[in-house]
Image: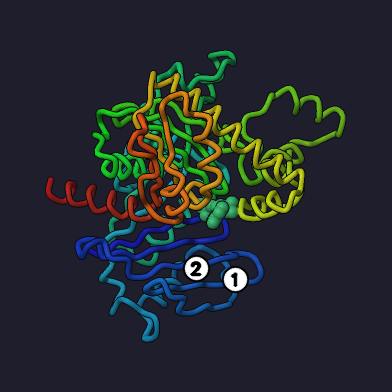
Amino acid sequence: MIILVLNSGSSSIKYQLFNIEEQEQLLAKGIVERIGIEGGALKHCVNGVSQLIVEKSIPDHTVGLKLIFDHLTSAEGGVLKELSEIDAVGHRVVHGGELFKESIVINDNVKQQVVECAELAPLHNPANLKGILSVEVLLPDVQQVAVFDTSFHQTMPKHAFLYGIPYQFYEKYKIRRYGFHGISHKYVAQIGAKLCNKEFTKSKIITCHLGNGASITAIENGESIDTSMGFTPVTGLMMGTRCGSLDPGILLFLEEKEQLSIRGISSLINKQSGLQGISGISSDMRDIEQAAGEGIYRAQLALDMYVYRLRKKIASFIGALDGIDMLVFTGGIGENSYRVREEVCKKLSFLGLQVDSHRNMETCGQTGIISSHESSVSVAVVNTNEELVIARETYGILNNTNKG
Ligand code: ADP
């Protein structure tokens, strides 16, 4: 069964094509960028090797998708003889609100509900929907499945997902913690559990997804019981350019002192804060680590704040879980930065948690256990693979639906 996975953004479409029944083989992947703006381009890779880069104007998502299809079936770099070989399309959909607790086969009703959730994710859901509608135009007979970034967190109890503001705003506008990165948190927890000989459905696990965006999740017996991102993905941990948790009074103060508009505040908390805002150098952890190594004060400060805030959040989630069996790191920083992992774990030794420094330094960009044999808590690094999860979900759901 050939499954195309699409992650449609407002001006880009990332794609991966899997032959799911042939050992989940990745046939091709790539990205269409700058849709609707000058400088449109397609980058297409086969077997991990960049095959070609096409630069041309891409006015909308349907044209972008057509370009992807042309290259999937082209003589050079093509991996399919014809498009009809694609059996199904799985979409990453960012926000499923309270409506979607699981992945689902897309029909008119689902599309309408994705539109309803767009109020909660105005940058993401409309773009996800454009991807779905473009597939309908170009591959009208193919079944599509939506996999939501928020679904895994729908098991959080009310006392964890509500904010301390008047209850009427939850009832009226559904203001609550939703959480994101759910596809990744669930996947790395399951892989980590297998690796460390734990039962996913009988363990207390904390997963740290540390990419440009970052969040951590407390998982009890296979269910998310709390997570650090909230109503939006700007809160929780300090990130590349996002501020993470913040006293909301600061924004009221700045609005007055700096005459900041709503747009200005949005840019401040989403684009100018985090590692970038503190260091004044970069939002990229590699640059921050290098600059800190060269003794640049604000880079070291950004690193210290990043680690401190992450460790504090982990400790608070240990409280939420009443214990911890396993800690998992993933995302670009979690998978690669042995320094961040070491610094975070160092002051969790009161738990009996011990990281083996050799294993930690060796495990960069790959999956492995980094805790010592004596550690009372297993610590693992797991390479996340959200596209593969979407392909598996799509396969699983369609197999069940078509059988039923
Ligand atoms: P996204 O959230 O956009 O998918 P990634 O998961 O790719 O992002 O993570 C990007 C982050 O990972 C950047 O801050 C980058 O600096 C960091 N990163 C990647 N490789 C390394 C490395 N070797 N050491 C430290 N940080 C790294």
Q: Which mark is residue 40?
A: 1
The reply to whether callout 1 and callout 2 are in contact (CB within 8 Å) is yes
- Residue 104 is left or right of residue 278, and the answer is left
Label 1 neighbour load within 10 Å: few <14, some 14-19, many 20+: some
Q: Which residue is mark 2?
A: 64
Q: Nearer the viewer, residue 181 or 303?
A: 303
Which residue is the extreme one toward the left?
403
- Residue 252 is left or right of residue 368, and the answer is right
Q: To which quarter of the image does residue 10 belong?
A: bottom right
Q: Amino acid at mark 1?
A: Gly
Q: To which quarter of the image does residue 195 belong?
A: top left
Q: Element at badge 2?
A: helix
Say if residue 230 shows up in the picture. Answer: no
The correct choice, above or below, for 101 with respect to 175 in the image is below
Q: Residue at x 28, y 59 (%)?
A: 88
Residue 167, horizontal then vertical, whole percent: 53, 14
Q: Element at badge 1?
A: loop
- Residue 359 is left or right of residue 260, and the answer is left
Residue 221, horizontal then vertical, whole percent: 29, 27
